[in-house]
């Protein structure tokens, strides 16, 4: 599978372990930036870059890292077609793919350490969407919400 990894300065400590873990699992990894040297780099820029790669089909999944994972998750979910979540436990990282077809894992380097990050990445990377009828039904509802707000004049911020 093709993965993207990206991190702002706060998330950078997990980027190397993310790449190494994915490659060890046999995945192709593209680095979308963040070298840890610029304290003014911003997580939305990295979330946008990997989200666009998912929309274009350049990658199937991505991992975006920032300090808490929350900002990366919020920014990532603004991109249509991206289903991102911050996960700090392995069950959610795996279940998010199985049940919700999550395609972006967001991690907080100031929340999880290296070893837990490796476990989370492994859980995410080895999971597959179940295709169960109830999960497909729910995912269609999520897509309907997305489509509604993309075309609705009420979809913008006030």
Image (cartoon, grey):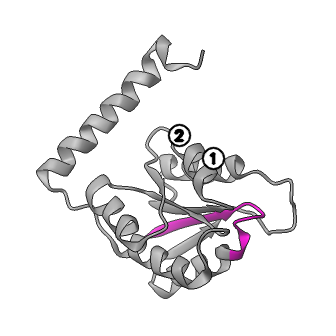
Q: Residues within 10 Å of mark 2 (few under 14, many from 20)?
A: some
Q: Which residue is mark 2?
A: 79
Residue drawn at x 47%, y 61% is 61
Residue 109 — which label? Answer: none
Magenta stretch contains residue 4: yes
Q: Which residue is mark 1?
A: 48
In the rendered image, the residue lying farthest to the bottom is 24
Mark positioned earlier in the residue sequence (1 or 2) = 1
In the rendered image, the residue lying farthest to the top is 153
Measured as percent of width and height from the top left, residue 47 is found at 62, 51
Position of the N terminus by quadrant: bottom left
In the rendered image, the residue lying farthest to the front is 111
Measured as percent of width and height from the top left, residue 99 is found at 26, 57
Q: Secondary structure at mark 1?
A: helix
For the residues labelled 1 and 2, say whether their Cβ atoms are less than 8 Å apart.
yes
Q: Nearer the viewer, residue 108 or 3?
A: 108
The stretch in magenta equals: 1-13
Q: Secondary structure at mark 2?
A: loop
Query: Distance of mark 1 from mark 2, alpha carbons?
Result: 7 Å
Position of the C terminus by quadrant: top right
Magenta stretch contains residue 108: no
Residue drawn at x 43%, y 79% is 122
Q: Nearer the viewer, residue 60 or 124?
A: 124
């Amino acid at each position: 599978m093709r993965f993207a990894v990206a991190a702002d300065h706060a998330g950078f400590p997990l980027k190397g372990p993310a790449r190494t873990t994915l490659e060890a699992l046999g995945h192709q990894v593209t680095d979308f930036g963040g070298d840890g040297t610029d304290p003014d780099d911003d997580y939305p820029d990295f979330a946008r870059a990997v989200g666009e790669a998912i929309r274009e089909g350049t990658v199937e999944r991505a991992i975006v890292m920032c300090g808490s994972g929350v900002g990366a998750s919020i920014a990532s979910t603004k991109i249509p077609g991206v289903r991102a979540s911050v996960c700090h436990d392995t069950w959610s990282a795996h279940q998010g793919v199985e049940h919700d077809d999550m395609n972006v894992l967001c991690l907080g380097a100031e929340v999880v350490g290296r070893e837990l990050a490796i476990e989370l990445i492994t859980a995410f990377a080895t999971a597959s969407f179940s295709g169960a009828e109830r999960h497909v039904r729910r995912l269609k509802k999520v897509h309907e919400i997305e489509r509604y707000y993309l075309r609705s004049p009420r979809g913008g911020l006030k």
